[in-house]
């Protein structure tokens, strides 16, 4: 079975990284169960393995950490639910691409619990929403904003890092980076979309939809 861990307050990034790596090693060794860890970080930027220096546009704004996960720059901070997934991909099919698709499906199913239609776009990592409430773009299409980021790493077939979903963060904090290297689209949150969703509401939805996508954790 998967253990669900919810941390109150803001968890320092260094603490989270240390705990995540320790748990992943324990899962690989067979001494701990798989885990999903729900938390919030203080304001910070993380650089994935594909991060480009020019995409850190305000390097002095918040601390910057080398995340050693896939992807580029992303922001974490209060009002954003960070979901660290420490799962045994080796025992879940050994298909990394399928695992990432499952993470995307999980986010989309969770957003659907609040009647938000999350979508995937080729060439753009993460989950996006079409903004029918905003003016059309120069090409005559509705703008699309990012609501969730995905970036994982595997060690001995155990995943860590994971997902972030914007509930009600300060969206101006994203201005210090080019999120995931994408300049032509914006960032949104559940509250920005006009939904009075709390962190607890999201956590309930995440747990419900996790079982729909991944099963109950038994192998």
Image (cartoon, rainbow, N blue to C red):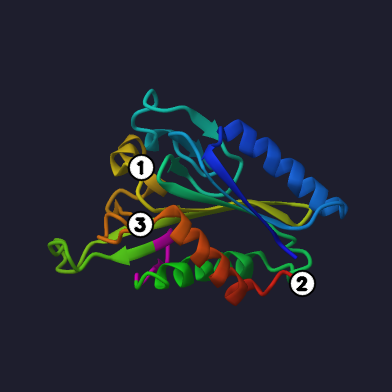
Mark in front: 2 vs 3: 2
Q: CA distance from mark 2 to mark 3?
A: 32 Å
Q: Quarter of the image holding residue 216? A: bottom right
Image coords of residue 7 (percent x, y): 58, 44
Residue 110 horizontal side relative to residue 12, left or right: left
Q: Which residue is mark 3?
A: 146
At 63% from the left edge and 33% from the top edge, which residue is drawn? 15
Image coords of residue 14 (percent x, y): 61, 31
- Within 10 Å of disc 3 (Cα), the crowding (few <14, some 14-19, many 20+) is many
Residue 39 horizontal side relative to residue 184, left or right: right
Residue 169 horizontal side relative to residue 97, left or right: left
> Bounds of the magenta span?
116-127
Residue 71 on the magenta span = no
At 30% from the left edge and 48% from the top edge, which residue is drawn? 183
Image quadrant where one finds the C terminus: bottom right
Foreground pick, 10 / 185: 10
Question: Residue 218, labelled with which disc?
Answer: 2
- Within 10 Å of disc 2 (Cα), the crowding (few <14, some 14-19, many 20+) is few
Foreground pick, 201 / 132: 201
Residue 29 in the image: above or below residue 17:
below
Local secondary structure at mark 1: loop
Image coords of residue 45 (percent x, y): 45, 36
Sequence-wise, the earlier of marks 1 and 2 is 1
Q: CA distance from mark 1 to mark 2?
A: 39 Å
Q: Which residue is mark 1?
A: 178
Residue 35 in the image: above or below residue 174:
below
Sequence-wise, the earlier of marks 2 and 3 is 3
């Amino acid at each position: 079975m998967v253990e669900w861990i919810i941390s109150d307050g803001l968890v320092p990034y260094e603490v989270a990284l240390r705990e995540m790596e320790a748990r992943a090693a324990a899962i690989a060794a067979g001494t701990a169960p798989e885990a999903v860890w729900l938390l919030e970080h203080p304001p910070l930027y993380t650089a994935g393995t594909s991060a480009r220096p020019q995409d850190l546009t305000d390097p002095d704004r918040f601390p910057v950490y080398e995340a050693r996960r896939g992807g580029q720059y992303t922001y974490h901070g209060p009002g954003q639910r960070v979901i660290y997934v420490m799962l045994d991909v080796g025992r879940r099919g050994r298909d990394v691409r399928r695992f990432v698709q499952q993470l995307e499906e999980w986010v989309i199913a969770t957003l659907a619990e609040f009647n938000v239609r999350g979508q995937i776009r080729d060439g753009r990592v993460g989950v996006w929403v079409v903004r029918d409430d905003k003016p059309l773009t120069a090409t005559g299409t509705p703008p699309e904003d990012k609501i969730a980021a995905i970036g994982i790493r595997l060690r001995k077939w155990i995943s860590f890092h994971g997902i972030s979903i914007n509930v009600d963060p300060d969206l101006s904090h994203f201005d210090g980076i080019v999120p995931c290297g994408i300049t032509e689209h914006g960032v949104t949150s559940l509250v920005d979309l006009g939904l009075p969703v709390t962190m607890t509401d999201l956590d309930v939805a995440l747990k419900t939809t996790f079982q729909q996508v991944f099963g109950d954790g038994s192998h």
